[in-house]
């Protein structure tokens, strides 16, 4: 086995540090080894070292500027760094090098969809379909952008072909493709108000994903219990050096938006980023990955138990790493949003490391949330995304954790209701800005002329502006939703 093959194998197995070591050995022999440079860039990207990944991919281009894969990797990195214009330039460069590369066309179509530029997205999808008429990613994206309906549309023949492919008793479709098509037809029948047929496809999509997942929420209960046991009042209010919420100051203040998926975190984020002093890093995995790994390296224990062992030096190191990562993405702003919903599990750790941080907890009617989770196709399926029973159990654990935080440090968290936010955005945003010690700015209460990149499942929905709460769509499926109704 060649050395580069070994490194690539380590990378594909998720052994990033071993892969990094071998790639570096290759570069020590030849600083212009393109495969090693590219591999090292991929490792940096996987380890959330976005600026390092950016620098490595730029170095790759200095060696060979004619490889579309390098531009695609660079575009992904630029999106992580919120360098949206550079991401677009990299995608278009990849396209110019090879206009028939399916991966590039998919990435361009998805990028322009996230930008709200649906006509441009549809253009690249048409290019893709001229090469692969039955491309499932293209079809699913057209459904998402509401370019297709079940009865009549410019894509009527394609829709019939896709439905036949899904309905056929064949093993040709992967589970991922089956799920994508099932979600797409569920949405099409939902819009056509054929709710029984729609639920059949929603159910099939979720079941198809669930069989691919090898754990269940029940197995997570000890972890959730350990959080409430470890983060007691004494640990969370112990500041031996007088470092508290009032006395600790930083140039950069993180704003964590937490809660369940589909609770309205993207809406809240998109309203807040219109403030002149607030920017966003999007959904960042730094707390669950970088900081959790750092805790283990410093103490030899996993989260949350490591949090009982860390001292002031440890806290300073971890805090510095997190804030440096934020500053890499948004160098100039004083307030930066991290809207990873699952950070609700880390609120105690956030309090330990960054007592100056702001925690905004967005809540929504749990049936609306549960149904929206079940209805949507998440990029990385988890059991609590694709089973009504699992969703209901996860919601219980989430509520226990959030109640615990409210019991031990209520002043650290601001609760916002999604329903109140959409009905009275000015009032609710005023509360958030006051909590963040920022002046109110009128533009924060509307989504008008919103041209930001939205890389979540809300990308199409939010382009339509703030929708008042009305009859929830789950009402049409009430007979099927017993697990989340109780």
Image (cartoon, grey):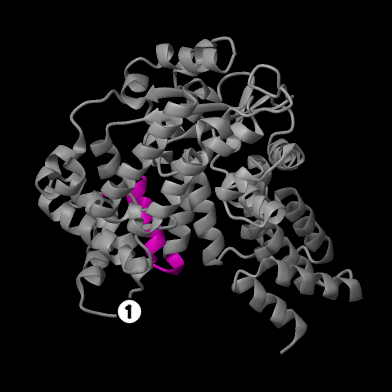
Residue drawn at (66%, 22%), measured in percent from left and top? Answer: 244
Rendered-image quadrant of the N terminus: bottom right
Task: State whether residue 408 is above or below residue 222.
Answer: above
Q: Tell me, yes or no, whether the highlighted magenta stretch contains residue 435.
A: no
Query: Is residue 22 in sight in this rendering?
Result: yes
Q: Quadrant of residue 337?
A: top right
Q: Quadrant of residue 287?
A: top right
Of residues 13 and 126, the one nearer the viewer is 13
Rendered-image quadrant of the C terminus: top left
Residue drawn at (14%, 38%), measured in percent from left and top? Answer: 475
Of residues 321 and 452, the one nearer the viewer is 321
Query: Is residue 463 in sight in this rendering?
Result: no
Task: State whether residue 202 is above or below residue 235.
Answer: below
- Residue 252, position as x, y percentages in the image: 70, 27
User: Along the horizontal axis of the image, is 119 left or right of 104?
Assistant: left
Residue drawn at (72%, 72%), measured in percent from left and top? Answer: 18
- Residue 28, position as x, y percentages in the image: 90, 72
User: Along the horizontal axis of the image, is 448 left or right of 187?
Assistant: right
Q: Tell me, yes or no, whether the highlighted magenta stretch contains residue 147.
A: yes
User: Along the horizontal axis of the image, is 100 left or right of 467?
Assistant: right
Residue wearing tag 1: 172
- Residue 162, position as x, y percentages in the image: 27, 65
* Mark 1 burial class by Cα count in 10 Å: few <14, some 14-19, many 20+: few
Segment colored magenta: 130-148
User: Along the horizontal axis of the image, is 397 left or right of 367?
Assistant: right
Task: State whether residue 216 is above or below residue 288.
Answer: below
- Residue 437, position as x, y percentages in the image: 59, 13
Residue drawn at (70%, 24%), measured in percent from left and top? Answer: 243
């Amino acid at each position: 086995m060649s050395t580069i093959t070994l490194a690539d194998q380590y990378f594909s197995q998720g052994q990033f540090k071993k892969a990094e070591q071998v790639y570096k050995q290759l570069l020590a022999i030849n600083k212009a080894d393109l495969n090693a440079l590219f591999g090292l860039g991929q490792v940096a990207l996987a380890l959330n070292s976005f600026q390092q990944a950016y620098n490595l991919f730029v170095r790759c281009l200095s060696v060979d500027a004619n490889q579309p894969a390098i531009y695609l990797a660079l575009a992904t990195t630029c999106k992580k760094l919120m360098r949206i214009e550079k991401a677009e330039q990299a995608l278009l460069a990849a396209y110019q090098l090879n206009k028939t590369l399916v991966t590039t066309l998919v990435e361009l179509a998805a990028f322009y969809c996230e930008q709200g530029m649906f006509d441009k997205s549809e253009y690249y999808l048409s290019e893709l379909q001229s090469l692969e008429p039955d491309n499932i990613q293209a079809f699913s994206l057209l459904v998402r952008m509401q370019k297709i309906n079940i009865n009549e549309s410019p894509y009527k023949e394609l829709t019939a072909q896709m439905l036949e492919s899904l309905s056929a008793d064949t093993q040709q479709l992967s589970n991922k493709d089956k799920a994508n098509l099932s979600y797409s037809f569920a949405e099409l029948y939902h819009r056509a108000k054929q709710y029984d047929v729609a639920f059949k496809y929603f159910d099939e999509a979720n079941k198809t994903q669930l069989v691919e997942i090898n754990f269940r929420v029940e197995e997570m209960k000890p972890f959730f219990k350990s959080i409430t046991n470890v983060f007691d009042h004494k640990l969370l209010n112990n500041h031996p050096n007088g470092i508290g919420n009032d006395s600790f100051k930083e140039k950069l203040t993180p704003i964590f938006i937490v809660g369940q998926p589909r609770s309205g975190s993207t809406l809240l984020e998109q309203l807040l980023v219109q403030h002149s002093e607030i920017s966003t890093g999007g959904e960042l995995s730094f707390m669950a990955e970088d900081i959790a790994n750092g805790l283990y390296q410093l103490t030899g224990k996993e989260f949350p138990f490591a949090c009982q062992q860390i001292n002031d030096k440890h806290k300073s190191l971890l805090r510095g790493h997190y804030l440096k990562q934020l500053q890499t993405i948004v160098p100039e702003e004083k307030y930066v949003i991290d809207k990873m919903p699952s950070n609700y599990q880390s609120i105690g750790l956030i309090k330990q490391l960054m007592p100056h941080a702001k925690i905004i907890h967005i809540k929504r009617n749990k049936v609306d949330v549960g149904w929206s989770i079940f209805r949507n196709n998440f990029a990385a399926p988890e059991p609590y995304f694709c089973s009504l029973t699992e969703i209901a159990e996860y919601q219980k654990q989430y509520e226990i954790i959030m109640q615990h935080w409210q019991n031990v440090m209520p002043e650290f968290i601001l609760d916002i209701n999604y329903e109140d936010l959409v009905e009275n955005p000015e009032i609710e945003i005023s509360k958030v800005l006051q909590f963040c010690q920022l002046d109110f700015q009128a533009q924060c209460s509307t989504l008008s002329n919103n041209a930001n990149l939205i890389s979540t499942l809300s990308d199409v929905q939010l382009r339509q502006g703030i929708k008042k709460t009305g009859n929830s769509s789950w009402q049409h499926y009430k007979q099927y939703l017993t697990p989340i109704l109780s």
